[in-house]
Image (tube, helix red, strand yellow):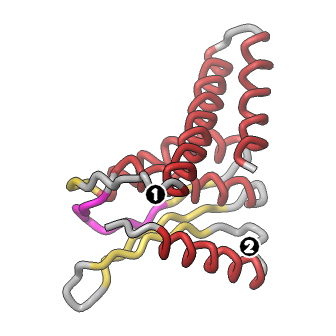
Amino acid sequence: MLVHDLKNPLNGIVHMSQTSPTEGNKSRIAHAARKMLQLVMNILDVQRISDTRLTVQKSPVDLNELIRAAIDYTSLSAQQKNLTITSRLPGSALVRCDRELIERVLINLLSNAIHYSDPNTEVTVAAEVVGTDKRELIVSVRDAGIGMTPDQVAKLMQEKELTDAGNKLS
């Protein structure tokens, strides 16, 4: 599926590179290239997870900055569908995480939300600090897309449980 997803941005790069190099095309070419790079990184991550070679490099990260970077990365795709991306973020949240890995997860969530949303709708990214000790964080991406069937959700959760069991990431 990921390899199939690479075809669209690659076709876009080829097409735009053959037309006049306007500023708009340069921006679209760069966007398509970044999207392809993200997909390639996903393929590599899946391979590393399968081989249990993925190592998490945790460091302090500003959550708001991380989410804004993911939104910026996907903004051209949202503009092309006339989607609005809004965010509801805490005033300040410093988290310990693997910035690159979490940013790719956020980009994937936003990309899927954009892909499956109807034009002229809204995608919302929200983060909320929860828990009695305020040490837990919930990040959500909501869209007005078609959603997943209960069977698809169950299959996804089953795959996640298998992955978690096989990969003890801490």
User: In the image, 25: left or right of 160?
Assistant: right
| Residue 64 relative to residue 13: left or right | left
Number of other residues with Cα within 10 Å of mark 2, as a class: few under 14, some 14 to 19, many 20 or more:
few
Q: Which residue is drawn at 51% across and 60% down?
A: 86
Q: Mark 1 against mark 2, which lies toward the viewer?
A: 1
Residue that lies at the very extreme toward the bottom in this rendered image: 132
**Residue 50 within the segment the image draws in magenta:** no
In this rendering, the answer to whether 15 lies above or below 103 is above
| Label 1, residues with CA under 10 Å away: few <14, some 14-19, many ≥20 | some
Quadrant of res 26 = top right
Q: Which mark is residue 52?
A: 1
Which residue has dot 2 on it? 147
Q: Which of 24 and 97 is in front in this view?
A: 97
Q: Where is residue 84 in the image (x, y as percent from the top left)?
A: 61, 54
Q: Is residue 24 left or right of residue 89?
A: right
Q: In this view, does 108 lie above or below 21?
A: below
> For the magenta stretch, what is the residue range?
87-97
| 94 drawn magenta | yes
- Residue 135 is left or right of residue 39, and the answer is left
Pick whichever of labels 1 and 2 is earlier in the sequence: 1
Q: At 44% across and 70% down in the image, what residue appears?
A: 139
Residue 102: x and y in percent read 41, 56
* Looking at the image, residue 81 lies above or below residue 147: above
| Residue at 72% across, 22% down | 13
Q: Which amino acid does label 2 sit on?
A: Gly
List x then y, in percent, for residue 169: 37, 66
Image coordinates for residue 2, horizontal then vertical, percent: 70, 46
Name the kind of residue labelled 1 in the image. Answer: Thr
Secondary structure category for the residue under label 1: loop
The reply to whether residue 96 is in sight is yes
SS at circle 2: loop
